[in-house]
Amino acid sequence: MLGAGLLASWSRGGWLGAAAGVGLVVLARSRRMLVAGVTLLIALLLWGAMGGLSPDVLPAPITERLADVPAYLGVGISQIVAQPVNDENFSVIERLAHWLAAERMWESAPWLGVGPGNYAAVYPEVRLPLWEDALGHAHNIYLNVLAESGLIGLAAYLLMWVGIVGWLWRRTRQQRPGSWEQALLMGVLGVVAHLTVHQFFDNLYVQGIQLQLALWLGSALAIAKRMPNKHLAA
Protein backbone atom coordinates (compact mmCIF):
# COMPACT_ATOMS: atom_id res chain seq x y z
CA MET A 1 0.00 0.00 0.00
CA LEU A 2 2.84 2.38 0.77
CA GLY A 3 4.34 1.69 -2.64
CA ALA A 4 1.01 2.30 -4.36
CA GLY A 5 0.58 5.57 -2.48
CA LEU A 6 4.10 6.66 -3.38
CA LEU A 7 3.50 5.89 -7.05
CA ALA A 8 0.14 7.67 -7.01
CA SER A 9 1.74 10.77 -5.50
CA TRP A 10 3.42 11.36 -8.87
CA SER A 11 6.26 13.03 -6.99
CA ARG A 12 9.69 12.48 -8.47
CA GLY A 13 11.22 13.96 -5.33
CA GLY A 14 9.23 11.43 -3.33
CA TRP A 15 10.54 8.59 -5.49
CA LEU A 16 14.13 9.74 -4.99
CA GLY A 17 13.59 10.10 -1.27
CA ALA A 18 12.11 6.62 -1.04
CA ALA A 19 15.09 5.19 -2.91
CA ALA A 20 17.45 6.90 -0.44
CA GLY A 21 15.47 5.65 2.55
CA VAL A 22 15.36 2.06 1.32
CA GLY A 23 19.05 2.18 0.40
CA LEU A 24 20.15 3.34 3.84
CA VAL A 25 17.95 0.78 5.59
CA VAL A 26 19.42 -1.97 3.41
CA LEU A 27 22.94 -0.75 4.18
CA ALA A 28 22.23 -0.76 7.91
CA ARG A 29 20.86 -4.28 7.71
CA SER A 30 23.47 -5.96 5.51
CA ARG A 31 26.32 -4.88 3.27
CA ARG A 32 25.65 -7.92 1.10
CA MET A 33 22.09 -6.75 0.51
CA LEU A 34 23.44 -3.33 -0.39
CA VAL A 35 25.79 -4.82 -2.99
CA ALA A 36 22.89 -6.80 -4.43
CA GLY A 37 20.70 -3.69 -4.46
CA VAL A 38 23.34 -1.56 -6.18
CA THR A 39 23.85 -4.29 -8.77
CA LEU A 40 20.11 -4.38 -9.41
CA LEU A 41 19.98 -0.58 -9.68
CA ILE A 42 22.80 -0.54 -12.23
CA ALA A 43 21.02 -3.24 -14.21
CA LEU A 44 17.79 -1.21 -14.15
CA LEU A 45 19.61 1.94 -15.28
CA LEU A 46 21.21 0.07 -18.15
CA TRP A 47 17.86 -1.43 -19.02
CA GLY A 48 16.29 2.01 -19.06
CA ALA A 49 19.11 3.43 -21.21
CA MET A 50 18.53 0.64 -23.72
CA GLY A 51 14.86 1.46 -24.10
CA GLY A 52 13.37 -0.15 -21.04
CA LEU A 53 11.47 3.03 -20.19
CA SER A 54 9.52 2.92 -23.42
CA PRO A 55 5.70 2.93 -23.25
CA ASP A 56 5.77 -0.65 -24.51
CA VAL A 57 7.29 -1.77 -21.19
CA LEU A 58 6.11 0.74 -18.57
CA PRO A 59 2.76 2.54 -18.40
CA ALA A 60 2.84 5.64 -20.59
CA PRO A 61 2.12 8.11 -17.73
CA ILE A 62 5.19 6.90 -15.80
CA THR A 63 7.35 7.08 -18.91
CA GLU A 64 6.17 10.63 -19.58
CA ARG A 65 6.83 11.62 -15.97
CA LEU A 66 10.47 10.55 -16.26
CA ALA A 67 11.17 11.35 -19.91
CA ASP A 68 11.77 15.09 -19.46
CA VAL A 69 14.35 14.74 -16.68
CA PRO A 70 17.42 14.44 -18.97
CA ALA A 71 16.45 17.69 -20.71
CA TYR A 72 17.20 19.65 -17.52
CA LEU A 73 20.55 18.06 -16.75
CA GLY A 74 23.54 20.29 -17.42
CA VAL A 75 21.34 23.34 -18.07
CA GLY A 76 21.61 26.48 -15.95
CA ILE A 77 18.69 27.40 -13.71
CA SER A 78 18.36 30.83 -15.32
CA GLN A 79 18.02 29.22 -18.74
CA ILE A 80 15.32 26.86 -17.52
CA VAL A 81 13.15 29.52 -15.85
CA ALA A 82 13.37 31.61 -19.03
CA GLN A 83 11.57 28.89 -21.00
CA PRO A 84 7.88 29.30 -21.86
CA VAL A 85 5.74 27.74 -19.14
CA ASN A 86 3.39 24.90 -20.02
CA ASP A 87 1.63 22.05 -18.24
CA GLU A 88 4.61 19.74 -18.64
CA ASN A 89 7.31 22.00 -17.19
CA PHE A 90 5.26 24.07 -14.73
CA SER A 91 6.31 22.21 -11.57
CA VAL A 92 9.99 22.32 -12.52
CA ILE A 93 10.09 26.00 -13.47
CA GLU A 94 8.01 27.02 -10.45
CA ARG A 95 10.47 25.30 -8.11
CA LEU A 96 13.50 26.83 -9.79
CA ALA A 97 11.92 30.29 -9.70
CA HIS A 98 11.55 29.96 -5.94
CA TRP A 99 15.11 28.67 -5.65
CA LEU A 100 16.35 31.83 -7.36
CA ALA A 101 14.18 33.97 -5.09
CA ALA A 102 15.66 32.23 -2.05
CA GLU A 103 19.15 32.85 -3.39
CA ARG A 104 18.37 36.55 -3.76
CA MET A 105 17.06 36.67 -0.19
CA TRP A 106 20.24 35.07 1.08
CA GLU A 107 22.39 37.52 -0.88
CA SER A 108 20.62 40.40 0.90
CA ALA A 109 21.59 39.02 4.33
CA PRO A 110 24.21 36.28 3.88
CA TRP A 111 25.14 35.60 7.51
CA LEU A 112 21.86 35.75 9.42
CA GLY A 113 19.26 35.67 6.65
CA VAL A 114 16.02 37.63 6.47
CA GLY A 115 14.68 36.07 9.67
CA PRO A 116 12.86 32.81 10.45
CA GLY A 117 9.37 32.78 8.98
CA ASN A 118 9.97 35.84 6.79
CA TYR A 119 10.24 34.07 3.44
CA ALA A 120 6.73 35.01 2.33
CA ALA A 121 7.09 38.58 3.63
CA VAL A 122 10.31 39.25 1.70
CA TYR A 123 9.37 37.24 -1.38
CA PRO A 124 7.68 40.13 -3.29
CA GLU A 125 11.00 42.02 -3.24
CA VAL A 126 12.99 39.20 -4.85
CA ARG A 127 10.49 37.22 -6.91
CA LEU A 128 10.81 36.54 -10.60
CA PRO A 129 8.20 37.82 -13.06
CA LEU A 130 5.13 35.56 -13.45
CA TRP A 131 5.65 33.98 -10.03
CA GLU A 132 3.68 36.18 -7.64
CA ASP A 133 2.59 33.53 -5.12
CA ALA A 134 5.17 33.08 -2.34
CA LEU A 135 3.81 29.62 -1.42
CA GLY A 136 5.32 30.14 2.04
CA HIS A 137 8.59 28.34 1.30
CA ALA A 138 11.35 27.94 -1.29
CA HIS A 139 10.53 24.37 -2.42
CA ASN A 140 13.90 23.38 -0.94
CA ILE A 141 14.38 23.20 2.82
CA TYR A 142 18.11 23.91 2.61
CA LEU A 143 17.66 27.05 0.52
CA ASN A 144 14.74 28.03 2.74
CA VAL A 145 16.90 27.82 5.87
CA LEU A 146 19.72 29.64 4.07
CA ALA A 147 17.40 32.47 3.01
CA GLU A 148 15.78 32.87 6.43
CA SER A 149 18.72 32.09 8.74
CA GLY A 150 21.81 32.71 6.60
CA LEU A 151 25.01 30.72 6.53
CA ILE A 152 25.09 30.44 10.32
CA GLY A 153 21.58 29.02 10.44
CA LEU A 154 22.19 26.57 7.60
CA ALA A 155 25.41 25.35 9.21
CA ALA A 156 23.56 24.77 12.49
CA TYR A 157 20.73 22.95 10.72
CA LEU A 158 23.10 20.68 8.79
CA LEU A 159 25.13 19.96 11.92
CA MET A 160 21.96 18.97 13.76
CA TRP A 161 20.75 16.81 10.86
CA VAL A 162 24.07 15.02 10.41
CA GLY A 163 24.14 14.41 14.16
CA ILE A 164 20.67 12.84 14.03
CA VAL A 165 21.62 10.56 11.14
CA GLY A 166 24.87 9.52 12.81
CA TRP A 167 23.15 8.84 16.14
CA LEU A 168 20.41 6.75 14.49
CA TRP A 169 23.00 4.82 12.49
CA ARG A 170 25.01 3.93 15.59
CA ARG A 171 21.95 2.95 17.62
CA THR A 172 20.60 0.83 14.79
CA ARG A 173 23.86 -1.08 14.48
CA GLN A 174 24.04 -1.58 18.25
CA GLN A 175 20.73 -3.40 18.55
CA ARG A 176 20.35 -7.17 18.40
CA PRO A 177 20.04 -8.18 14.72
CA GLY A 178 16.47 -9.05 13.82
CA SER A 179 14.96 -7.51 16.96
CA TRP A 180 11.90 -5.28 16.85
CA GLU A 181 14.00 -2.50 18.35
CA GLN A 182 16.41 -2.64 15.44
CA ALA A 183 13.50 -2.78 12.98
CA LEU A 184 11.92 0.35 14.44
CA LEU A 185 15.22 2.22 14.46
CA MET A 186 15.80 1.20 10.84
CA GLY A 187 12.39 2.60 9.97
CA VAL A 188 13.19 5.93 11.62
CA LEU A 189 16.55 5.98 9.84
CA GLY A 190 14.73 5.43 6.55
CA VAL A 191 12.34 8.29 7.30
CA VAL A 192 15.23 10.66 7.99
CA ALA A 193 17.06 9.53 4.83
CA HIS A 194 13.91 10.12 2.79
CA LEU A 195 13.48 13.63 4.18
CA THR A 196 17.16 14.41 3.58
CA VAL A 197 16.78 13.78 -0.15
CA HIS A 198 13.16 14.74 -0.80
CA GLN A 199 13.62 18.13 0.84
CA PHE A 200 16.07 19.16 -1.86
CA PHE A 201 12.93 19.59 -3.96
CA ASP A 202 10.33 20.67 -1.42
CA ASN A 203 9.65 21.76 2.15
CA LEU A 204 7.88 18.87 3.85
CA TYR A 205 7.46 20.54 7.23
CA VAL A 206 3.77 21.17 6.56
CA GLN A 207 0.51 19.58 7.70
CA GLY A 208 2.09 18.53 11.00
CA ILE A 209 4.85 16.43 9.43
CA GLN A 210 7.37 17.91 11.86
CA LEU A 211 5.26 16.58 14.75
CA GLN A 212 5.24 13.11 13.20
CA LEU A 213 9.02 13.30 12.82
CA ALA A 214 9.32 14.30 16.48
CA LEU A 215 7.20 11.27 17.42
CA TRP A 216 9.48 8.90 15.50
CA LEU A 217 12.65 10.45 16.91
CA GLY A 218 11.16 10.29 20.39
CA SER A 219 10.41 6.60 19.87
CA ALA A 220 14.01 6.03 18.78
CA LEU A 221 15.28 7.85 21.86
CA ALA A 222 13.06 5.73 24.11
CA ILE A 223 14.48 2.54 22.60
CA ALA A 224 18.03 3.83 22.97
CA LYS A 225 17.45 4.52 26.67
CA ARG A 226 15.75 1.16 27.16
CA MET A 227 18.56 -0.92 25.65
CA PRO A 228 21.82 1.07 25.86
CA ASN A 229 24.58 -0.44 23.75
CA LYS A 230 24.08 -4.04 24.88
CA HIS A 231 24.30 -5.68 21.49
CA LEU A 232 27.10 -4.62 19.17
CA ALA A 233 26.62 -5.62 15.56
CA ALA A 234 29.41 -7.61 14.02
Image (cartoon, rainbow, N blue to C red):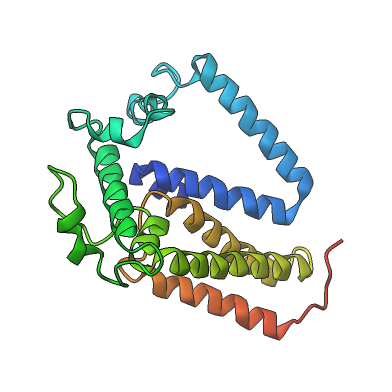
> Residue 176 vs residue 70: left or right?
right
Asked whether residue 178 appears in the rendered view, the answer is yes
Q: Nearer the viewer, residue 39 or 104?
A: 104
- Residue 144, given in percent of the width and then of the height, sits at 35, 60
Seen at 49% across and 51% down, the residue is 197
Residue at 49% over, 15% down: 51
Left or right: where 67 falls relative to 23: left
Question: Eyeballing the image, is 87 above or below 28?
Answer: above
Name the side, left or right, on which 151 lies relative to 174: left
x and y percent of residue 38 in the render?
67, 36
Task: Report if residue 1 is visible in the image.
Answer: no
The one nearer the camera, 105 or 166, is 105
How many numbered marks appear?
Answer: 0
The C terminus is located in which quarter? bottom right
Which residue occupies the foreground of this view, 42 or 164? 164
Residue ID at (47%, 58%)? 195
Q: Quadrant of residue 227?
A: bottom right
17 sits to left or right of 83: right
Q: Up-down: is 214 above or below 66?
A: below
Q: Residue at x 31, y 66 (%)?
A: 206
Compared to residue 54, the image places residue 40 above or below, namely below
Q: Is residue 215 above or below residue 6?
A: below
The percent coordinates of residue 198 (x first, y second) are: 44, 51
**Residue 23 appears at what percent x and percent y?**
62, 48
Q: Which of the pair 27/120 is nearer the observer?
A: 120
- Of all residues shown, which one is farthest toward the right? 234
